[in-house]
Image (cartoon, rainbow, N blue to C red):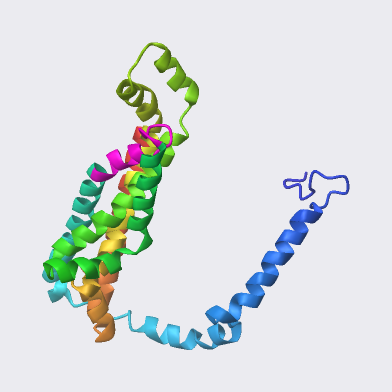
Amino acid sequence: MRIFNWEWSTKNGLPHTGIIIGITIITLLLVLTAPVVEMNPQHIYNSGDNLLDFLSHWFIQPEWEYLPKLAGKLWETIEIAIVATALALVLSFPLGILAAINTTPHPLVYHITRNILSFMRALPELVWALVFVSAVGLGPLPGVMALTFVTTGFLAKFFAESMEVVNRKVISGVKATGASSLQILMFAILPQALPDFCGAVLYVIDRNVRAATILGLVGAGGIGYELVSSIRLFYYSRLVLILFSIYLIVTFFDRLSNIIRSKVI
């Protein structure tokens, strides 16, 4: 019995000519542009010994005395991520309404809001962290501000796109009852977009936890500075604990988001 049917739905069972040409062009472009990013298989193969040598240092007795300081930095990282996500959620919701074509009060407002959100997402959190560190000084505050700024741009875009793809028949039905614009938003659009909202928020929390781990690189709080310092100073006994703790935190939030998402859906 054939489990997989590899034949295409064409007369000769082969892919369409356009698909073959497209795949060929993409493959040629990838091969031709590989030297630009130094994609040399021989160089990668020869670097394997260096990678194994670096990983071999991880099999070392952890520095257990470092755990109290590590716990404090990890808690700071989690707080940065959660506070930034909460603030971004409050700020992004009204921006998302203005940036959705079916909820914005005017097309001009739609285009202006979309451009603002694009600007907020244009630069990574690390760059904005540098900006806010220069403005308010070192510490977790610039980290919260940087994550809030960028996350607001992402969440507002997610919210707007979720509201734009809702079932228009439901909107028409609510509108036929004489509902106002606010009532249409509350009873026709938001209930349909709620699962997507929750999915976007849970994804952003997971993303912000990972992003907050590197903000300490520029003095914006969190575990990032300890991570980079351990790598540069070859403190492998600390590096093992830092990496494993980051893995545990990210895994915890990933499992938690899956549970919440399944209940919401």
**Name of the residue lying farthest toward the right:** 12
Residue 249 falls left or right of residue 20: left
Residue 58 versus residue 213 in the image, above or below: below
Residue 245 in the image: x percent, y percent?
A: 25, 65
* 177 or 31: nearer the viewer: 177
Which residue lies at the image location 73% right of the left edge and 47% below the top edge? 4
The relative height of residue 222 versus residue 260 in the rendered view (above or below) is below
Q: Is residue 5 left or right of residue 36?
A: right
Q: Is residue 48 something that shows in the picture?
A: yes
Image spot of residue 61 (x, y percent): 24, 79
Q: Residue at x 18, y 72 (%)?
A: 219
Q: Is residue 61 visible?
A: no
**226 drawn magenta:** no
Instruction: Find the residue positioned furthest to the top.
Output: 177
> Residue 75 or 94: which is nearer the viewer?
94
Residue at 42% across, 12% down: 176
Residue range in magenta is 91-106
Q: Nearer the viewer, residue 243 or 169?
A: 169
Quarter of the C terminus within the rendering: top left
Q: Is 147 placed above or below 261 here?
A: below
Residue 161 coordinates in the image, percent (x, y):
43, 41
Left or right of 1: which side holds 79? Answer: left
User: Residue 173: percent from the left, percent from the top?
Assistant: 44, 15
Number of numbered discs overlaid on the protein picture: 0
User: Hey, which quadrant is residue 211 in on the image?
Assistant: bottom left
Residue 100 is covered by the magenta coloring = yes
Most foreground residue, 201 or 235: 201
Q: Is residue 105 above or below residue 20?
A: above
The quadrant of the picture occupied by the N terminus is top right
